[in-house]
Amino acid sequence: MSADRARVRGSYDTVAEEYAGRIGGELAHKAVDRALLGVVLEEAAGGVVADLGCGPGHVAGWLAGHGAEVVGVDLSPRMVELARREQPEATFRTGDLLALPAADGEFAAAVALYSVIHLEPDELAPAFAEVRRVLRPGGVLLVSFHLGTEVRRMEEWWGHQVDVDFHFLETGAVADHLARAGFGVEVRMEREGLPEEAPTRRGYLLARRTE
């Protein structure tokens, strides 16, 4: 694991408990996210859905609560520990977006909500290639991210000492990476931040693995 990935893992281990308490109920006020997750459920058609960068497992829990078989993957062992405790209806694995602990074509669909923002620019392409590997042909991927071009380094987060970068991304650039990895982008959407969220604009892409 690279030093950058280790920094991300250590930072999320540090804030895991507080993150779960503050963020774990966020879908209650995110109607757009719930609608997009509903599309993913329909596209999965009963197949297994991966939640990549699952954090404390709240999205995986929502998907499982709506009938899906779900596997969550997160870089942070502490996040995975919390997810297993809080969302026993889903399965969780510790792993990296760059080397997913999953078999070729294991998943019918996947979501990666605000997890690619911790990848370095040269890691986006291999990460999307890895996601393509674990999706079955025709499987869909929903990606979300903060919009922009800046990189924000956080060294303090909710009173905890951390060392993690947040890479803001442009919709077109992410779509280009997806296309090069073998995905066809079908939906592009942007929205303003909600009052309950950090004040950033948000981007979403729904892409399908080509044959």
Image: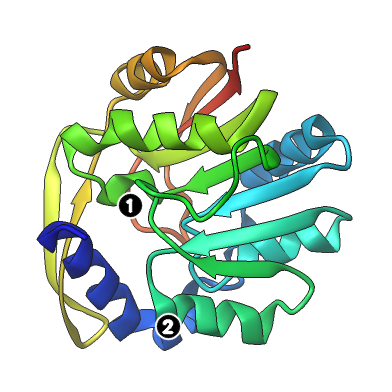
As drawn, 104 above or below 27: above
Write the residue at 57% across / 38% down. 134
| Disc 2 residue type (three-letter) | Arg
**Label 1 crowding class (10 Å Cα cut-off): few <14, some 14-19, many 20+?**
few
Write the residue at 89% across / 55% down. 67
Position of 194 compared to 117: left or right?
right
Residue 28: percent from left, percent from top: 68, 63
Label at residue 171: none
Identify the image quadrant of the C terminus. Answer: top right
As drawn, 164 above or below 125: below
Write the residue at 46% across / 57% down. 53
As drawn, 165 above or below 161: above
| Disc 1 residue type (three-letter) | Pro
- Visible residue check, residue 19: no
The answer to which quarter of the image holds residue 140 is top right
Name, please, the residue furthest toward the front.
103
Which is more toward the observer, 31 or 113?
113
Which one is earlier in the sequence, the residue at label 1 or at label 2?
2
Q: Which residue is mark 2?
A: 78
Callout 2 secondary element: helix
Callout 1 secondary element: loop
In the image, which is nearer the foreground, mark 1 or mark 2?
2
Residue 33: percent from left, percent from top: 62, 45
Which is more toward the observer, 45 or 145?
45
Mark 1 → mark 2, Cα distance in angstroms: 27 Å
Q: Which residue is mark 1?
A: 199
Residue 184: percent from left, percent from top: 54, 12
Identify the image quadrant of the N terminus. Answer: bottom left
